[in-house]
């Protein structure tokens, strides 16, 4: 039986919680200092643990960045299907998918900003993984757009380009939300944006 320094049995849940604690600290530090100006000592201090303990979970600073971004993308992959599975109508599925995507961003603004600002610091192979994961998520949404076109909910459009526009819009929330009244919620932000983008695309009966 493996026991940690506090006398607790080391379980998969404890390992996951520790990794998340370190990632959360890294996201905070990288966001404040910038990835290149941050050190593992900074992360350890923020997490209130030793540097040595961090190295038991992550190889280096880039590994921390990579895992933090990957965790965010994985959450999209889980939350979007969970939201769309509640509906059968393609248009409702599409709206549910965008709102689910936006809620993840809203709940993890610092991680979303970190990915936007620092993903270029990743090595080539890790960047390939991130790009592939992003493309998978975008494909979920573009497939829903195609379904909306096929069932007559949307007019015939370039689904790939439209998906790109929607993704860019939703990702602007952590960057541009300060421009709007503080009372504006993420749901209201998404609804206002979609109303504009769909005004000449979505048929009125949908």
Image (spheres, rainbow, N blue to C red):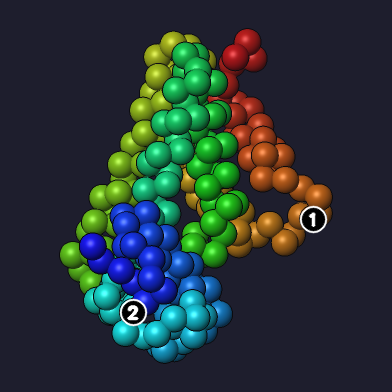
Quarter in which the N terminus is drawn: bottom left
Residues at circles 1 and 2 in contact by the CB criterion of under 8 Å: no
Q: Quadrant of residue 186?
A: top right
Q: Residue at x 32, y 62 (%)?
A: 10
Q: Nearer the viewer, residue 197 or 76?
A: 76
Q: Nearer the viewer, residue 95 or 158?
A: 95
Q: Which residue is mark 2?
A: 53
Q: Is any part of residue 83 visible from this angle?
A: yes
Q: Nearer the viewer, residue 149 or 19?
A: 19
Position in image of residue 36 (x %, y %): 40, 85
Position in image of residue 77 (x %, y %): 38, 41
Quarter in which the C terminus is drawn: top right
Q: Is residue 103 left or right of residue 178?
A: left
Give the alpha-carbon distance from disc 1 to disc 2, as whole Å.
39 Å
Q: Nearer the viewer, residue 7 or 144?
A: 7
Query: Relative to 32, is 194 above or below?
Result: above
Q: Residue at x 72, y 61 (%)?
A: 178
Query: Relative to 74, is 58 above or below?
Result: below
Q: Along the polypeptide, which appears first: circle 1 or circle 2?
A: 2
Q: Residue at x 54, y 51 (%)?
A: 105
Q: Quadrant of residue 140?
A: top left
Q: Which residue is mark 1?
A: 182
Query: Relative to 103, is 12 above or below?
Result: below
Query: Relative to 172, is 58 above or below?
Result: below
Position in image of residue 169 (x %, y %): 56, 48
Q: Residues within 10 Å of mark 2 (few under 14, many from 20)?
A: few
Position in image of residue 182 (x %, y %): 79, 55
- Residue positioned most to the left: 125
């Amino acid at each position: 039986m493996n026991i940690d320094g506090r006398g607790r049995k080391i379980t998969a849940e404890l390992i996951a919680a520790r990794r998340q604690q370190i990632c959360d600290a890294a996201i905070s530090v990288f966001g404040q200092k910038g990835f290149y100006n941050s050190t593992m000592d900074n992360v350890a201090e923020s997490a209130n643990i030793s540097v040595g303990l961090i190295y038991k979970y992550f190889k280096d600073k880039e590994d921390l960045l990579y895992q933090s971004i990957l965790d965010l993308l994985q959450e999209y992959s889980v939350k979007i299907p969970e939201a769309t599975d509640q509906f059968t109508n393609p248009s409702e599925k599409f709206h549910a998918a965008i709102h689910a995507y936006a809620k993840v961003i809203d709940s993890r603004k610092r991680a979303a900003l970190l990915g936007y600002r620092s993903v270029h610091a990743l090595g080539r192979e890790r960047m390939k993984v991130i790009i592939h994961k992003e493309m998978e998520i975008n494909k979920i949404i573009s497939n829903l757009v195609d379904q909306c076109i096929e069932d007559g909910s949307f007019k015939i459009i370039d689904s790939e380009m439209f998906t790109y526009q929607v993704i860019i819009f939703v990702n602007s929330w952590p960057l541009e939300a300060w421009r709007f009244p503080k009372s504006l919620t993420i749901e209201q932000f998404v609804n206002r944006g979609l109303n504009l983008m769909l005004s000449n695309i979505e048929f009125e009966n949908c």
